Amino acid sequence: MPLLTAFLVGLLFGIGLLLSGMTDPGKVQGFLDLFGLWDPSLAFVMGGAILVGVVAFRFAGQRTRNLLGGGMHLPTEAGIDARLVVGGLLFGIGWGLAGFCPGPGIVSAASGQGLGLVFVGAMLLGMLGFELLERLRPRRAATVAGP
């Protein structure tokens, strides 16, 4: 049942991205073109998503189980560190250059758009690179600390 629910929620999310035009890289780049032909529609989509998220997290924080009976796994880290800032900068730069973030990129790739396929491939390579660096990280810390 959780897999079916995840599929249906993902499908609904993907349809929403398609209907709002967020799978078009030109829409994102138009939003970022502040001194040209600025397209504010992405701001409305983001505002709606933030509103839904604020309400959902408010209710989720008061629960111990999700609506399907599983455990709640909410973020516990509240601090801002260099890894978060660098990650946010890399995400933003990639988003601006490609015109995709992960959700719309996956929807675009699934619909057969060439740019979406390239984006998802690059995203997967980036994720693999991150995982490889993370596996080296404890060894580096242990080496610095010494025996």
Image: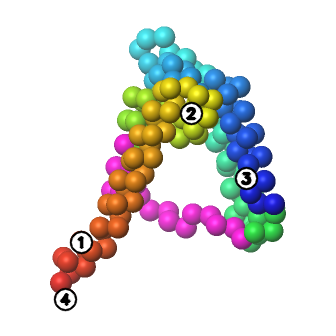
At label 3, which amino acid type do we have?
A: Ala
Q: Which residue is mark 1?
A: 140
Q: CA distance from mark 3 to mark 2?
A: 19 Å
Question: CA gap, disc 4 to disc 1?
Answer: 12 Å
Point out residue 62 in the picture as x, y percentages from the top left corner: 74, 66
The amino acid sitting under disc 1 is Arg
- Label for residue 6? 3
Is there a contact, CB below 8 Å, between mark 2 and mark 4? no
| Residue stretch in magenta | 71-90
Q: Which residue is mark 4?
A: 147
Residue topped by disc 2: 109
Q: Position of residue 65 (x, y in %)?
A: 76, 69
Q: Mark 2 or mark 1: which is in front? A: 2
* Disc on the earlier residue, 2 or 1: 2
Q: Residue 44's x, y, as percent? A: 64, 28
Please report whichever mark, 3 or 2, sits nearer to the chain's N-terminal start: 3
